[in-house]
Image (tube, rainbow, N blue to C red):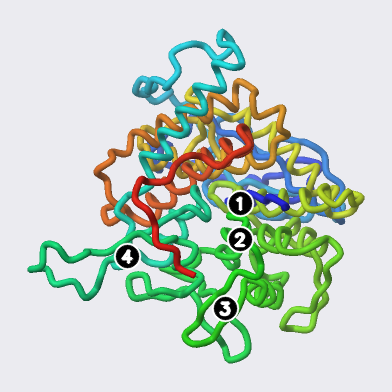
Amino acid sequence: MKTLLFPTFFVIAFCGFAVAEDNTLDNMSAPEEILSFDLTNEVTAPAQIVPSEKTEDTSLVLPGDIPVKPPMLVRLDSGQLVQVQYTSRSQKQSQPVAQPPAPELPLQQDFNAMSETERLATLKQSIQDVLRANTRRGVNTQNQTPSDVLLMALPYGADAKVYQPNPNVDPRDKNAPKGNYVYSIGTLCWNIPCNGKTLLRSDGSKIIARVGYGYQRLPATFAAVLAMSNIMPNYELKLGSSSYTIANLIASERLAVSKDKNLSMALVALSFYGESKDQWKNELGETWNIEKMVASELNRSLDQGSSDVTDWLLGLTSAVKLYESENKPIRGPLALAKKQLQTYQDFVLSIQNDRYLWHPKFFLYKGFNPDAFETMYSSGHILRWLVYSLPDKELQEPQVVRSVMSLATTVNRVKPETMANSMSAKEMESLAVSLHALSLYYQRTFDESPMASPQDKAVAVR
């Protein structure tokens, strides 16, 4: 069985650095007045390679510059497209912000001083402990939306569980069952209401997964999670008295593919539930395939300071892995995508902070934020993609291992009594994606599912 693991940034081909004088703002406030975290170590993400353009590696931002608005494309007199980062030139070098001491990692010994057997055993136990401790954060179908249930299914896949209260229980009857645990994937596939919302709907001819607050953050996210959980395409989906399958949902996602959309999660899903040779028509009658989706993603404008960049990388990685698994030639847009992935792997490791994690602004800065959720949000997204995309042998590199252990330590800073009801949507995503990164690392390193199931037996929703 193919195994694709789930879980973007605006750039363009360029050969030089061009910023007009009228694009700078000399009267900007100090960095610490703009944002609440350290901006002293600005970095420049690598350029996106657009199929129709030639690219060279050239710095876009000078040390000490402060981004004041998103980068944009400028066409030079030569006709060449370059990416311009609008900045404020610092008049004096910012002083480093005092940082609290780094939390102790679970491992007290240096990784290089441990034997491979000791290192793997300690890693395995540490990840298992974190995953077990977070199997239940009070997520239930009464208070949490389909989006919440979907998020918390990420780390545990088909084994993920959600509590379903008994709506008919008499509170005066102390012996009456209050509810039970059911499988999260089954709950969503059978369209069981979560906080009064149902994920699936029909337009009369096809089944559709809703997008928006409380549902999917991005189109095809549900299909991507099903793919990451290795759910077979013949698994049943229920919509009232009508019965569908995941294959029907995938057909709907293919119809929705468009050059104007974010296709990152669609690439994850369609690369798992399809083949490189597949070709189809969307709702507009346009012919699409995986290669055309990759080309569209390579040309899409991205936000290098948000999870958009890591979603983008996940989609490209899924497509490249599909071609590699089929021993198909990697050429054209796929070759450009593979080059992008290799460039970003090196770049991501070069901007780790002294905790071996990443700045809350993803690829814009190299620094530290003491807030656990802010750190988990960026570091979870980045490490998840990195673990997914790296070759097996590189998963044991000290920088990667330290990142895994440091993220596990950060997750442990979220107190066990912190329930889902008290978390914001971003905090919930921070926790879920970080746990997913740890789970993926566990699966790839130890070739088994993490032992994270609670002791309570779940009732299967079939």
Q: How far is mark 4 from mark 1, CA to CA?
A: 26 Å
Q: Earlier in the sequence, mark 2 or mark 4?
A: 4
**How far across and down, in percent of the image, does residue 438 sit?**
51, 38
Mark 2: amino acid: Ile
Q: Contact (CB < 8 A) between labels 2 and 4?
A: no
Cα distance between the residues tagged 2 and 4: 22 Å
What is the number of the mark on residue 231? 2
Are the residues tagged 1 and 3 within 8 Å (C-beta)? Answer: no
Distance of mark 1 from mark 3, alpha carbons?
Answer: 20 Å
Give the residue at mark 1.
6
Give the distance between the C-alpha atoms of the residues marked 4 and 3, in whole angstroms. Answer: 24 Å
Residue drawn at (10%, 67%) of the image: 173
* Residue 69 at x, y percent in the picture: 54, 51
On screen, 424 above or below 346?
below
Q: Are marks 2 and 1 in contact (CB under 8 Å)?
A: no
- Mark 1 closeness class: few <14, some 14–19, many ≥20 residues within 10 Å: many
Callout 4: few (<14), some (14-19), or many (20+) C-alpha neighbours within 10 Å?
Answer: many
**Is residue 92 left or right of 255 when viewed as pictured?**
left
Task: Determine whether, in the image, residue 22 is placed left or right of residue 337.
Answer: left
Q: Nearer the viewer, residue 447 or 421?
A: 447
Distance of label 2 from label 1 (alpha carbons): 13 Å
Say which amino acid is labelled 3. Ile
Q: Nearer the viewer, residue 137 or 9?
A: 137
* Relative vertical location of residue 340 with respect to residue 100 in this rendering, above or below: below
Between discs 2 and 1, the one toward the N terminus: 1
Identity, as a three-letter code, of the amino acid under mark 4? Gln
> Going 76% across and 49% down the picture, which residue do you hit?
82
Name the residue carrying label 4.
Answer: 164
Do we see residue 183 in this rendering?
Answer: yes
Q: Secondary structure at mark 1?
A: loop
Task: For the residues labelled 4 and 1, say whether their Cβ atoms are less than 8 Å apart.
Answer: no
